[in-house]
Image (cartoon, grey):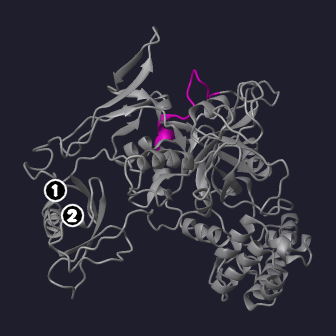
């Protein structure tokens, strides 16, 4: 039989007889993994039951059966000299900190209830037959009739676990990631590592591409139209494209059995260079970690990315060019690789995968023109195969945007064969090798999008605080803008702070202490007036108000002075000076600091 062993250095497959002892299994694992340290063996990460005293017990008596997974950890210093394998019942999933929506959905059966069919049902109201019995959430006919192209992630899990229960009473995590790399060292230990040698035990299998039958996210819901309008406004004003990260949360989507929707609450626009046909992100973004932390304290997370690809029709009627369609492309190969890279950075935690992660809920939204020339949104994910191919670096972008190029094998990297199937002109399914390209459409997963019928946005959309990193528009996202927003809401601090961009500015300003930043975010998350009153009386908040006041008055004085100087004779160039409060070097000519607003003397 075969026992799978997940180790800190990778996964192993151990061939062993059921009559073999636990000690023999440990020895085979040590040999296969070439471990220099002592190991412990478990059947679950909690490591709750030890078999240190049962080394000579047979695997069948443990019990361990064909296909079971064991988990290997290195023994700590001071442990007993003999490895002490520990085995526990596997009839439960792994313990992983999943998203709350996963905890909700895994407890639901997801069955689709049907009413009594008056044409075919021949029983009473309390009876049931094949025409009215509930359907499973993965029922192919139901999905086709309701035009659901991809089943939901949890429906896919239900489908896999339903099949496994029919063959085994033991739970085995059903989700496995694709691995297209050569196993090094080879499990057989019969030859030198690649490229000097390769065999069927270390060589990755060939890849046959086919559309993915499930999707991790079923719908994207933008809380308010202004989220999209703000990005489109940048294009209308500058004529250049714009990029942003989507922040929000996940909730149950009841339009699809066991569905998940990503609710977008705000967009963060990182530093970038914008052109009329290109976007260049300025990486690394030093503020990225802080922004993710702010979002987490608000109960939000990064759910995707969005960017524009707009071109004016030139007819003066406000329409745009439709560039993405079935005769062209939907996502280019370069965009597809970027989406795969971002999805690999944002994996979904699940207890139904041996590694604790599987796939990603990170979405890609493109604002572009539709067939009617109107501005529309297209939403996608790339498949798990695409994520693995990008991770293992076996594909690259092609000159033709609708094609993906397969790299050639080298002495440093082995690339498995890639095939794809399609119907030819005679409606016959043909299997074609991807030498050297294949259509990008095989890697795409479409996601629907929309807006709520009764909007209840998490953030206030009135009197919006200026969006960060918009220097091209001359936007002042500083203390003056903050003071203006606070005045507009008078004493309603809860409402005044309910702006994602204002919170990002305050959390990075350095004026508030860490505990004051946490209190500020709690005010927005809980809408607690008592916490708002506590924040308003804190030292950092009062200092911020004073600095904002001084900054605003200083800018007004400089504006008056500039107008006066323009009317008079030429004056000598101002002398630079360092602020004794914040150490910022000012260009001179005025009596208050450009940053903190405090007086020069």
Instruction: Report the side of 517 relative to 173 (left or right).
Output: right
The one nearer the camera, 37 or 387, is 37
Instruction: State how far apart marks 2 and 1 are (Cα).
Output: 9 Å
From where the camera sits, is residue 289 visible? yes
Number of callouts in the render? 2
Residue 16: give its label: 1
- Which label's residue is closer to the chain start, 2 or 1? 1
Instruction: Report the side of 172 relative to 264 (left or right).
Output: left
Most distant residue in the top direction: 426
Instruction: Report the side of 485 relative to 35 (left or right).
Output: right
Q: Is residue 546 above or below residue 376?
A: below
Instruction: For mark 1, give the secondary structure.
Output: loop
Mark 1, other Cα within 10 Å: few <14 / some 14–19 / many ≥20: some
Of marks 2 and 1, the one in the foreground: 2
**Residue at 66% over, 29% down:** 145
Are the residues flagged by discs 2 and 1 in contact, CB closer than 8 Å?
yes
Instruction: Give how far across and how far down residue 3 sits, in percent.
Output: 24, 57
Q: Which residue is mark 2?
A: 59
In which quarter of the view is residue 46 placed?
bottom left
Instruction: Give how far across and how far down residue 599 sits, in percent.
Output: 76, 86
The one nearer the camera, 417 or 309, is 417
Q: Which residues are magenta?
A: 323-337
Instruction: Give how far across and how far down residue 596 sits, in percent.
Output: 72, 80
């Amino acid at each position: 039989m075969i026992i799978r062993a997940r180790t800190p250095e990778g996964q192993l497959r151990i061939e062993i007889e059921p009559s073999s002892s636990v000690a023999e299994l440990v020895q085979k694992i040590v040999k296969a993994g070439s471990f220099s340290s002592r190991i412990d063996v478990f059947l679950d990460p909690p490591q709750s039951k030890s078999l240190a005293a049962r080394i000579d017990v047979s695997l069948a008596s443990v019990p361990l059966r064909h296909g079971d997974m064991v988990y290997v950890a290195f023994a700590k210093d001071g442990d007993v000299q003999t490895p002490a394998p520990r085995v526990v019942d596997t009839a439960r999933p792994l313990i992983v900190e999943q998203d709350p929506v996963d905890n909700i959905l895994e407890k639901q059966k997801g069955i689709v209830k049907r009413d009594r069919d008056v044409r075919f049902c021949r029983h009473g109201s309390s009876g049931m037959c094949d025409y009215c019995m509930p359907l499973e959430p993965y029922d192919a006919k139901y999905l086709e009739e309701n035009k659901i192209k991809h089943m939901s992630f949890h429906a896919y899990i239900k489908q896999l676990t339903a099949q496994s229960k029919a063959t085994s009473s033991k739970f085995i995590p059903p989700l496995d990631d694709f691995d297209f790399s050569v196993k090094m060292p080879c499990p057989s230990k019969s030859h030198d590592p690649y490229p000097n040698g390769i065999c069927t035990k270390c060589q990755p299998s060939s890849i046959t591409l086919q559309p993915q039958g499930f999707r991790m996210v079923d719908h994207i819901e933008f809380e308010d139209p202004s989220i999209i309008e703000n990005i489109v406004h940048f294009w209308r004003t500058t004529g250049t494209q714009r990029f942003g990260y989507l922040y929000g949360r996940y909730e149950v989507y009841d339009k699809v059995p066991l569905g998940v929707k990503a609710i977008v609450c705000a967009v963060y626009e990182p530093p970038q260079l914008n052109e009329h046909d290109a976007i260049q992100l300025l990486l690394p973004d030093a503020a990225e970690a802080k922004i993710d932390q702010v979002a987490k304290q608000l109960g939000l997370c990064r759910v995707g990315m969005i960017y524009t690809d707009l071109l004016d029709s030139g007819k003066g009627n406000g329409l745009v060019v439709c560039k993405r369609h079935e005769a062209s492309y939907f996502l280019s190969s370069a965009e597809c690789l970027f989406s795969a890279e971002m999805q690999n950075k944002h994996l979904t935690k699940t207890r139904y995968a041996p590694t604790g992660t599987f796939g990603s809920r990170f979405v890609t939204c493109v604002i572009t023109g539709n067939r009617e020339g109107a501005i529309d949104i297209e939403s996608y994910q790339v498949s798990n195969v695409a994520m693995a191919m990008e991770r293992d670096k076996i594909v690259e972008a092609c000159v033709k945007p609708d094609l993906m190029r397969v790299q050639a094998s080298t002495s440093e990297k082995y690339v498995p064969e890639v095939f794809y199937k399609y119907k030819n002109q005679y409606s016959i399914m043909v299997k074609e090798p991807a030498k050297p390209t294949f259509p990008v459409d095989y890697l795409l997963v479409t996601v629907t999008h929309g807006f709520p019928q009764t909007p209840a946005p998490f953030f206030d959309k009135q009197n919006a605080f200026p969006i960060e990193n918009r220097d091209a528009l001359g936007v002042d996202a500083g203390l003056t803008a903050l003071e203006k927003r606070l005045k507009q809401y008078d004493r309603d601090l809860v409402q005044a702070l309910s702006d994602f961009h204002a919170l990002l500015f305050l959390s990075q300003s350095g004026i508030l202490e860490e505990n004051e930043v946490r209190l500020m975010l709690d005010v927005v998350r809980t809408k607690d007036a008592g916490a708002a009153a506590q924040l308003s009386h804190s030292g950092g908040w009062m200092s911020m108000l004073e600095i904002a006041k001084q900054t605003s008055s200083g800018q007004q004085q400089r504006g008056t002075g500039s107008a006066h100087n323009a009317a008079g004779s030429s004056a000598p160039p101002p002398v630079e000076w360092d602020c004794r409060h914040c150490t910022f070097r000012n260009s001179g000519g005025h009596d208050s600091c450009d940053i903190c607003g405090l007086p020069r003397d």
